[in-house]
Image: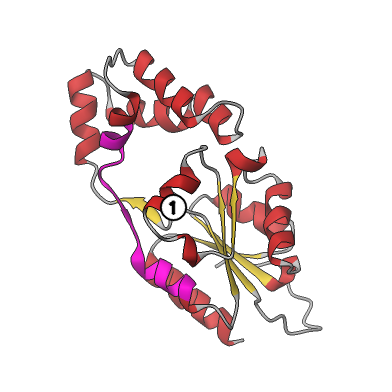
Amino acid sequence: MERPEDDGTALIVVRAVLFDLGGVILRTEHEAPRQHLAGRLGVEYDDLVRLVFESETSRKASLGVISEEDHWRSVTKNLKWDGDPFAFRDEFFSGDALDHDLLNFLRSLRGRALPGLISNAWSGLRQYILEHNFEDAFDAMIISAEVGVVKPNPKIYHMALDQLDVRPNEAVFVDDFIENVKGAQAVGMSAIHFKDSGETLAQLKKLLKN
């Protein structure tokens, strides 16, 4: 875990625990569906993943400049896929799975700390969360496409802190990208670089005991 420097003058009580979604709570557990999709399309696996997550339309969709559907239409057009763009999306993500241990941990925090979400995501994320019935795990959900700001911009962290009504030094943030961890630290939050659930939960439980 990486944390801001503490001058030792006060013990800070953690009042909010914020998580990223993709790569943390929702992870690709099986690569086979994407590998099969790439094979059928005659493209490299890594090129397919980059097109979905690192293209200009992905960036615009993450900022809410275009819709998620527009992004998938661009992806499938680029790949000469003539079917339903959302059928393509569903196949692409079919190897992903929710980590229910993390979700249950967030639910268990109530009464001790406020659980929240900060996610760089497209416009369909809130509906996905509602359809999969885990909106109850969060007291605040900051989704980049809805607010027009992406991590590690300081504004997105402050939006979450304001919604939960906590100070930066009263919050801890979990993300799988080190640049987003550093972004949280830059505004004064504690932060954990996610590598696996067990290690992350152990670090959080230790923090919450302080």
- Quarter holding the N terminus? bottom right
> For residue 62, which quarter of the picture?
top right
Q: Is residue 20 left or right of residue 102?
A: right
Number of numbered discs: 1
Give coordinates of residue 55: x percent, y percent: 48, 25
Q: Amino acid at mark 1?
A: Ile
Residue found at x 34% / y 30%:
86
Magenta region, main secondary structure: helix
> For residue 8, which quarter of the picture?
bottom right
Q: Secondary structure at mark 1?
A: helix
Pick the front one: 103 or 191: 103
Residue found at x 36% / y 54%:
132
Q: Which residue is mark 1?
A: 129
Q: Is residue 40 above or below residue 162?
A: above
Q: Which span is picked out in magenta?
A: 89-107
Q: Residue furthest bottom?
A: 209
Q: Is residue 151 visible?
A: yes
Q: Is residue 136 above or below residue 13?
A: above
Residue found at x 73% / y 48%:
155
Pick the front one: 3 or 156: 156
Pick the front one: 137 or 154: 137
